[in-house]
Image: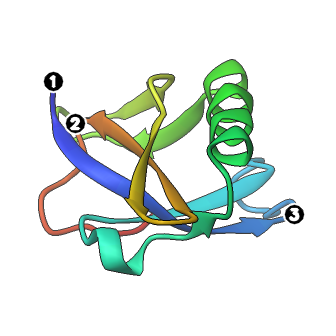
Amino acid sequence: MGIKQYIKSIKRGVRAETERPDDFYFTPDIEQAYSAATQKEADFDCDTYNSKGVEIDSADGGTYVCRNFRSEERRAHEFVVFCEAPFIAGQGSR
């Protein structure tokens, strides 16, 4: 469905110029992704992001709301969250 990107970080708070409560930064590199210590934590994060939706700039033009976050194990005790969406190629963060 699109390009696989991992959550690298999240900047919490309101940006006055966009009305978005959080800024999500993505990376195609699993090694740069933020990791949770347990699968349960990562799955909780996925549920949270899926219920809220995360708006990104779309390669198709306009915006796209991501609601298909999933987690995977990077290595023992490291679980990362990713999404496949029409991310703009080469644009690793939002």
Classify residue 86 as left or right of residue 35: left
Label 1: few (<14), some or many (≥20) within 10 Å?
few
Q: CA distance from mark 2 to mark 1?
A: 7 Å
Name the residue type under label 1.
Answer: Met
Label 3 environment density (alpha carbons within 10 Å; few <14, some 14–19, many ≥20): few
Which secondary structure, mark 3?
loop
In the rendered structure, find residue 38 and report the number of the disc placed on it. Answer: none
| Whole-percent x, y for residue 84 in the image | 28, 36
Q: Residue furthest right?
A: 13
Residue 21 percent coordinates (x, y): 81, 50
Please name the residue shown 64% across and 46% down the image.
42
Q: Which circle's residue, 3 or 1, is located before the other in the chain?
A: 1
**Is residue 54 left or right of 65 when viewed as pictured?**
right
Amino acid bearing label 3: Gly
Residue behind mark 1: 1
Q: Are marks 3 and 1 in contact (CB under 8 Å)?
A: no
Image disc number at residue 13 = 3
Q: Earlier in the sequence, mark 2 or mark 1?
A: 1
Contact, CB < 8 Å: mark 2 with mark 1? yes
Q: CA distance from mark 3 to mark 1?
A: 30 Å
Q: Position of residue 43 (x, y in %)?
A: 64, 35
Q: Position of residue 11 (x, y in %)?
A: 72, 70
Could you give the CA–CA distance between mark 2 and mark 3, rounded to whole angstroms?
25 Å
Q: Residues within 10 Å of mark 2 (few under 14, many from 20)?
A: many
Amino acid type indicated by mark 2: Pro
Who's the residue at 70% across and 19% down the image? 51
Figure check: 20 above or below 35: above
Q: Secondary structure at mark 2?
A: loop
Per the image, the residue denoted by label 2 is 86
Helix, strand or loop at mark 1: loop
Viewer-proximal residue among 3 and 45: 45
